[in-house]
Image: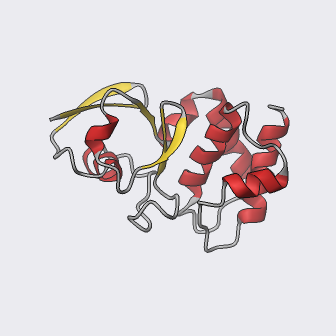
Amino acid sequence: MLTLRVNGEAHEVEADGDMPLAYVLRNLLGLKGTKIGCGLEQCGACTVLVDGQAAQSCAAPAATFEGREIVTVEGLSSDPLGRRVQDAFVDAGAAQCGYCTAGLVVAVTALAKDSDAPRDRDGLKSALAPHLCRCGTHPRVLAAAEAVLEDRA
């Protein structure tokens, strides 16, 4: 049995501690926004916030997240900044197939919360480089990120 704090609520889940967090979120808690792309923590689709920091969850054992605050893309809507990031993505049309979008929204939210995060386009490109998008929406993702981050500078 694991106790995970997700989106502000404690959840008791019957899972092997070695089960990757993304599988617990999707299959046991029904939070389908966190996607499993590569399964190797190399594409970013599985990104969630853990104690305010972006973390990939498709290979990390769920037991390592006990006692930590996990926020999925579903939980961002209750955070004013997370909601602003979601709205900026919609306004910029920063999704095509949408598979990677949740991970990118979470990553941009983490950047917006980090006062030391880059604010210029080159810095943002570098910070978001671990997120793969095959649809080619990166220019719109950067536009969404810039829209949110320029107000946070």
5 displayed left or right of 131: left
- Residue 92 seen by the camera: no
Residue closer to the observer: 10 or 62: 62
- Residue 69 seen by the camera: yes
Question: In the rendered image, which quarter contains the N terminus?
Answer: top left
Residue 35 image point, x, y percent = 44, 58
Residue 91 image point, x, y percent = 76, 50
Residue drawn at the location 29% of the way across and 48% of the way down: 61
Question: In the rendered image, which quarter contains the C terminus?
Answer: top right
151 displayed left or right of 114: right
State whether residue 46 is above or below residue 50: below
Residue drawn at the location 68% of the way across and 52% of the way down: 127
Would you identify the image quadrant in which residue 10 lies? Answer: top left
Residue 128 image point, x, y percent = 66, 55
Residue drawn at the location 16% of the way across and 46% of the way down: 16
State whether residue 45 is above or below residue 16: below
Residue drawn at the location 66% of the way across and 45% of the way down: 108
23 displayed left or right of 93: left
